Image (cartoon, rainbow, N blue to C red):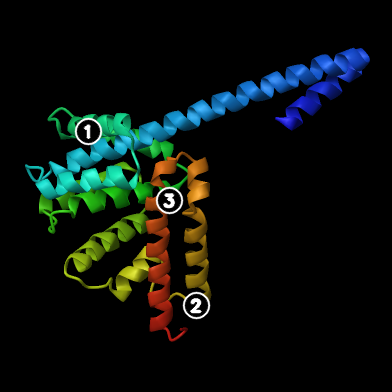
Amino acid sequence: MLILTLIGAFIGYQFGGFIGLLIGGGAGYWLARRLRRKMVEKLLGTQQQFLSSIFAVMGCLCKADGRVSENELEASRQLWDKLRLNEAQRARARTDFNRGKSADFDLDAELARVRQMASSQPALRQLFLQVQLTAVAADGELHPAERDMIMRVVRGLGCSEAEIAQVEAMLRGGAHTAANEGPSLEDSYQVLGVSENASDAEVKKAYRKLMSDNHPDKLAAKGLPESMREVAKERTAEIGNAYEQIQKARGNK
């Protein structure tokens, strides 16, 4: 805002002296406020669409095995609490969830919207998928139809092969959690997106990049709703745990 005000003042001064400076500065200030308002409106719209798509796809996934279990519904309600949604937002979430459950729901079109929002931010895709995996694993089992649907979602979001491997690791991690087991070392490598043959330097580089890409403040600037900050923190905790397990296995801790 200050830069545009100064530029406007400078140009105004060149053409109109002191009066031009005042007029140019005022015009620059007005333009800066207008641009800022449009950017805020666009960001809020993106955040609302992101949440809407989360619950719609969740409804579709939970219905993939033919029914939505009470545990899956409870997982959805728990997500409302975690996201600190107000009553109006909860009503919108219910509407979107039911939209995803409907027989005429266009999953591919919904995923295309998310893919566009997260085109330059793989971390947003990962958070989106993390929420979906939590929902379908809520009943303690992953039905084959749900697994197939998850992989359809992954590909519909335009995930790379490395990201697909990470999702598969997350799926296995969910199974380990249900059995009260920790993630395997292999899965920890997948979470970081490196092979077991990677050097210590490569592992550390991958870890630092993921932690940077998944920083809640950075994601918020790209469209992550403020209410999803806790989900982002869970993702960074998962990355940190994977790195710690690898370091211990290598004798670095």
* Within-10-Å neighbours for mark 3: few <14, some 14–19, many 20+: many
Residue 163, horizontal then vertical, whole percent: 36, 55
Considering every residue shown, the one lying at the far front of the view is 87
Whether 176 is drawn above or below 82: the answer is below
Task: Tell me the SS state at disc 3.
Answer: helix
Q: Is residue 46 left or right of residue 74?
A: right
Q: Which residue is mark 3?
A: 123
**Could you tell which of marks 1 and 3 lies nearer the N-terminus?**
1
Q: Where's residue 44, x and y in %?
A: 46, 31
Q: Circle 1 sits in a helix, a strand or a loop, which is it?
A: helix
Q: Find residue 196 and report its image quarter.
A: bottom left
Q: Are marks 3 and 2 in contact (CB under 8 Å)?
A: no
State left or right for residue 43 relative to residue 17.
left
Q: Amino acid at mark 3?
A: Ala
Foreground tag (3 vs 2): 3
The 10 Å Cα crowd at callout 1, few under 14, some 14 to 19, many 20 or more, is some
Q: Which residue is mark 2?
A: 200
| SS state under label 2 | helix
Q: Residues within 10 Å of mark 2 (few under 14, many from 20)?
A: few
Between marks 1 and 3 in the image, the one whose residue lies nearer the viewer: 1
User: Mark 1 — residue?
Assistant: 94
Q: Amino acid at mark 1?
A: Arg
The reply to whether residue 151 is in sight is no
Question: Which of labels 2 and 1 is toward the front?
Answer: 1
Q: Earlier in the sequence, mark 2 or mark 1?
A: 1
Residue 92 versus residue 184: which sits nearer the camera?
Answer: 92
> Foreground: 167 or 74?
74
First along the sequence among labels 3 and 2: 3
For this orientation, the residue located farthest to the bottom is 251
